[in-house]
Amino acid sequence: MEKILAAASAVLGKRLSRPVDLGGSSRSHVLRCVTDDGGAVVVKAYRDAAGFAAEAAGLPLSGGFGPRLLAVDPSFPLIVMSDLGVAPSLADVLLGDSAEAAREGLLTWARTYGRIAVAAAGRQQEWERSRAAYSGEGAGWRLFRDIGDLGEVLPDAPSGLEDELTALEASSERYPVFSPGDICPDNNLLTADGLRVLDFEGAGYHAAFLEAAYVRMPFATCWCVFRLPPGLEAEIEDVYRKEVVSVHPELADDVLWEAGMRKAVATWTIFMTWVLLPQARKRDQPMHSTRTPVPSERQLLRYRWGHLLNELDRGRDELPAVREAVQAWLETTAEWDVAELPHYPAFTSTGPG
């Protein structure tokens, strides 16, 4: 911690003291510190060079919805950001007891990410140059780059699955918008000044559909996942879509939008199956080690697979190999004794669960 303080003080040009550990993750160490003039800043030191490069390059594109980037030390590596203060997260509200607060939080969340996309429109090359300067390598967004042949989760892959995954990955780059990356509920603070976004370690440009799928699934890669009340999903999705249509007018076409959304849901579902299924086959465990309530890994996987099949039923024989793979996962895990995924606690008065 002393080394982090010393390096951050040097690059900021102000002495920092009284660090408070904000938790961070396995990839980073985050401290709230006091400056010698009585202010407060947040210092983030990285174990992961790619996360550092993405965040340092991404924060200036946040449209004012993220922390201000105050200083960067690529040699450590670390950044110094403005302090957003203490406020409830969207996860806190969704797991709370106010349906109205949860609804307003979700609508604000969708509107914010749409406006971030608008603010960063046309700046993709700028971001790629900045990220490359910090990392020494080109910027590339490849969701499936680490999955390989999916052998660990699907030993007998259906014929054509690899081709469908290649097509899904290609579709993930069409109609690009800027995203902070990890847009899960706990990375969104509901402050007095509006929603503010934390964590740009996965920042970059990808298809608007991948962002919007976080509403429809909901929250594709997150631990804070329960069901939304009927009708609310479409309302939130529409808020996001209305913003990004100004960047990509083609997205006003309902047929194009729905096809893109089905592919995005398939993309995230396949990816998270690869992440979760190997461990879930051995034993079930909660999606978060300390927060409650949360779904279990098995509960979430079976919900995701069923949800994806419902999405594919709306299409016209799209992704037959993906459909076959999902049906195989459902069949081979039929003995898992898990309850149906309930509604978010904040909405329990609006539906079962």
Image: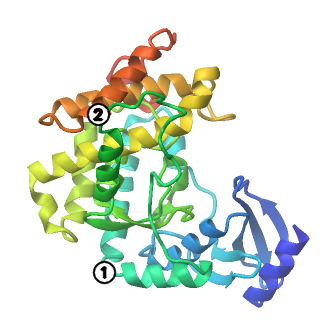
Q: Which residue is mark 2?
A: 321
| Up-down relation of residue 242 to residue 153 (above or below) | below
Mark 1 vs 2, N-terminal side: 1
Which residue is painted at 40% across and 25% down in the image? 303
Q: Nearer the viewer, residue 277 or 156?
A: 156
Which label belongs to residue 219? none
Q: Inspect this view and state whether residue 223 appears.
A: no
Q: Amino acid at mark 2?
A: Ala
Q: In the picture provided, is 240 more to the left or to the right than 329?
A: left
Which residue is painted at 42% across and 85% down in the image? 126
Q: In the displayed orientation, state which residue is furthest to the bottom.
A: 13
Q: Inspect this view and state whether residue 228 appears.
A: yes
Which label belongs to residue 122? 1
Which residue is painted at 30% across and 67% down in the image? 176
Q: Nearer the viewer, residue 252 or 19?
A: 252
State the image coordinates of residue 54 (x, y, percent, origin top left): 55, 71
| Up-down relation of residue 6 to residue 181 (above or below) | below
Within 10 Å of disc 2 (Cα), the crowding (few <14, some 14-19, many 20+) is some
The answer to the question of whether label 1 and label 2 lie on touching residues, with beta carbons closer than 8 A, is no
State the image coordinates of residue 168 (x, y, percent, origin top left): 31, 50
Camera-side mark, 1 or 2: 2
Question: What is the spatial separation of the Cα atoms under label 1 and label 2, in whole angstroms?
Answer: 36 Å
| SS at circle 1 | loop
